[in-house]
Amino acid sequence: MAAGYLDILRTRHAARLLAGTLVGRLPNGTAHIAIVLFTRAEGGSYTLAGALAAAYGLATAAGQPLLGRAVDLYGQPRVQLPAAVVSALGMAALALLGLDSLPAAYAAVVVAGVFTPPLEGGLRALWPTVLGREDRVHRAYAMDAVAQEVMFTVGPLLVTVLVSLRSPAAALLVINALGVLGALSVVLSEPSRTWRSAPREAHWLGALRSRGLLALLGAFFFVGLALGSITVAGVAYADDHGRESVYGWLMAALGLGALVGGAVYGARQWAGPPERRLRVVVALLALGYLPLMLTPGVPAMTALAALAGVFLAPAIACSFIVVDRHAPQGTVTEAFSWLVTTFGVGAAAGTAVAGPAVELGGTAWSFAVAGAGGVAALLVLLATGRVLAAPGRTPAVVAGSENDRNGAAEPGFSSGHKA
């Protein structure tokens, strides 16, 4: 299992790009947790915490495809690093100003969200040039999803440790400073500096003119909704049990389960179309969310959280391949950024719904939102099966790289998009 991942990490630039992207994405990956904890520490209600986290998520959703399109047009360094700095300044303003002025607090999280750099989509645009072969790129997608779960495992623990040692405000400042350093590491690398997107057809819809991509985004909106609701539900569960640390363990268990599932998924080559495989994985993901409504004692709940996470990374890794198969030419970063956007919108909806659900019906109701989100994602994939079964173009990893103007890719390799 480890040999394939080690082969990728030994490739020049790969480890740096992966590590830099993960560190650069820490602010985005932990923002909902940090905002909820900060709001509660400042005396705000669950509803306010959910609303602020939702505002951040919606702002991120709006900014990602716009910044992704800018990256496709102007390159990575000119967009990623300035965006990371402005986003960090937005979170710093929230930490320093607090909740005395709610309009200022909302403005701060909106700025932080809109300017969140599209590092995630940028990394997936770089993999074909760096790795050169279809099988290695697909394994990198799985490794990428696994590495995200390392971040989602370590990130909540890091936030809770910083909160315990200092304060929620200090956690916001430190996490966002690390994010800027991660983005800096990525944009200073040779692949990021030299990467250029393929020529694209002038179309105001950009990547969204692909019906298959729209179907995928519709499904992953509900996956995001499930994850966003768990953020608030986990805090409520920790409050019920009188220990703030319980929240960090639940989130870490969720990430650990996804890490294990993603590692196993990426260790083998899968036969058959990825669209069909995605439906099976999302069905198992939905099945894993439903038992969380039982809200048993802490040890059992931690085990259920780990089980609920097992199929998350495989679903994400499979979705990367589906995006690659359906994105129009020259829209690679934008297409992946739209996937991030659907997660953002879904997570924002999930946090916004889960907050009132806690106050109206208790913790179990907020976990019910997660179960409903998983089921809805599956229903969308089933309803759009015919659209997803007909990719709009040849996958990016077939024959000469669209992102490799200098011919760095191996002969016979391509990431050219065919609309």
Image (cartoon, rainbow, N blue to C red):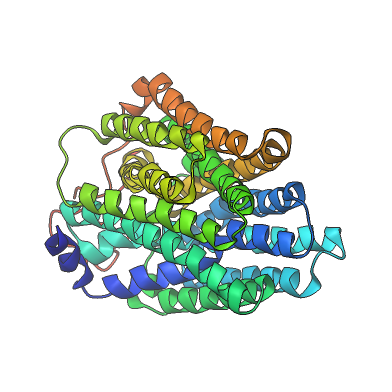
33 or 401: which is nearer to us?
33
On the image, the x and y values in percent for residue 419 come to 36, 38
On the image, the x and y values in percent for residue 65 come to 54, 51
401 or 44: which is nearer to us?
44
Q: Quadrant of residue 363?
A: top right
280 or 47: which is nearer to us?
47
Q: Number of marks in the image?
A: 0
Asked if one can make out residue 264 in the rendered structure from this viewpoint, the answer is yes
Q: Is residue 180 above or below residue 314?
A: below
Q: Say left or right for 416 vs 152.
A: left
Q: Is residue 16 above or below residue 26?
A: below
Q: Residue at x 55, y 39 (%)?
A: 225
Q: Say left or right for 311 vs 84.
A: left
Q: Is residue 22 above or below residue 102?
A: below
Name of the residue lying farthest toward the right: 101
On the image, the x and y values in percent for residue 101 come to 87, 63
Q: Say left or right for 15 vs 267.
A: right
Quarter of the image for the N terminus: give it: bottom left
Q: Say left or right for 286 vs 418.
A: right
On the image, the x and y values in percent for residue 157 come to 49, 67
Asked if one can make out residue 210 in the rendered structure from this viewpoint, the answer is no
Q: Residue at x 42, y 68 (%)?
A: 21
Q: Residue at x 51, y 56 (%)?
A: 68
